[in-house]
Amino acid sequence: MDLFKESENVVIFKVDRDDLDLEEFLVTKDLSGRLFRRLYKEKNIYINGKFRRKGLKLEKGDIVSIYMGDEEENTSPEKIDIDIVYEDFDLLILNKQPNIVVHPTKSHQENTLSNGISYYFKEKGIKKKIRFVNRLDMNTTGILIVAKNSFAHQQMALQFESNIVEKKYQAIVKGRVEKQEDYIDLPIGREEEKSIRKAIKEEGQEALTKYSVIERYEDATLLDIQIFTGRSHQIRVHLNHIGHPIIGDTLYDEESTQIHRQALHSYYLKIKHPRTKEYIEFIAPLPRDMEELINHLKDK
């Protein structure tokens, strides 16, 4: 392994000050204490190519390298088409298609996105575990982030926990939304103890959603939606609460004859790159079934 060259397995930092030890320096790079302890215990953090004690003071110009070895992914590989938006050493960004489960479950051991990614990794010789950073419901389409190593996963999880990721969706809802834009600031909790449905609950978790109208139809509206928190079913619950459920959302409303899922698409994501810290953005075009629904609504 070349500890002075960046790769899928090696992340490099150049020390820009003299007064920090190894752990203190990596804290400034947002490395979690948990990940630091694991990597250090495995002797996978190096100073100028050598493993050194963590209390040693670094000097300006030192090179700190984090090494993450090859891994084995146990998900069964299946040749399933995956729509790759972006890929580099750290990230695999996908445009998730409708009606596909992300993770294998007891009832869905095959034909999941994970099976398709496992096949892709094996075909490309990528010896890494599949680490999903964000989640989308089976019937929601759009941008999914897969971290290709533990460093990238920890860095991205921190951004989501801190609500600094910019997330935008498009949804087609029932009825003509009167306000051009508005915020929905209502807490969300589980409807009943064992129910998968969520509802507005005083004792629920804080949830903030902004919507703006893109286009109005005779009895429906296309909305642009930004969420500032990441509660389960947040958009679906908030829009249903204001009397504009998402078309095709059978959990919170009813089936549609025009689309066989909820008309909800995660089209935009802006993040800080885990390695470079530069902002990057991803856009996933509206899926065909939502375009067809829009065309149907325009023709009414």
Image (tube, helix red, strand yellow):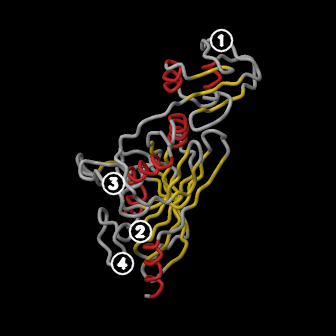
Residue receiving disc 4: 258
SS of the residue under disc 4:
loop
Q: CA distance from mark 2 to mark 4?
A: 10 Å
Amino acid found under the numbered disc labelled 1: Leu
Image depth: mark 4 or mark 3 in front: 4
Q: CA distance from mark 4 to mark 1?
A: 65 Å
Image quarter (top left, top right, bottom left or bottom right) of the N terminus: top right
Image depth: mark 1 or mark 2 in front: 1
Which of pointers 2 and 4 lies earlier in the amino acid sequence? 4
Q: CA distance from mark 2 to mark 3?
A: 19 Å
Which of pointers 2 and 3 lies earlier in the amino acid sequence? 3
Q: Which mark is residue 15?
A: none
Amino acid found under the numbered disc labelled 2: Ala
**Residue at 64 percent of width and 29 percent of height:** 2
Residue receiving disc 1: 56
**Residue at 54 percent of width and 62 percent of height:** 284
**Residue at 31 percent of width and 67 percent of height:** 253
Check the image and name the residue furthest to the bottom: 300
Mark 4 surroundings within 10 Å by alpha-carbon count, few (fewer than 14), some (14 through 19), many (20 or more): some
Image depth: mark 2 or mark 3 in front: 2
SS of the residue under disc 2:
loop
Amino acid found under the numbered disc labelled 3: Ala
112 or 140: nearer the eye? 112
Which of pointers 4 and 3 lies earlier in the amino acid sequence? 3
Which of pointers 1 and 2 lies earlier in the amino acid sequence? 1
Residue receiving disc 2: 263
102 or 233: nearer the eye? 102
Image quarter (top left, top right, bottom left or bottom right) of the C terminus: bottom left
Q: Which mark is residue 199?
A: 3
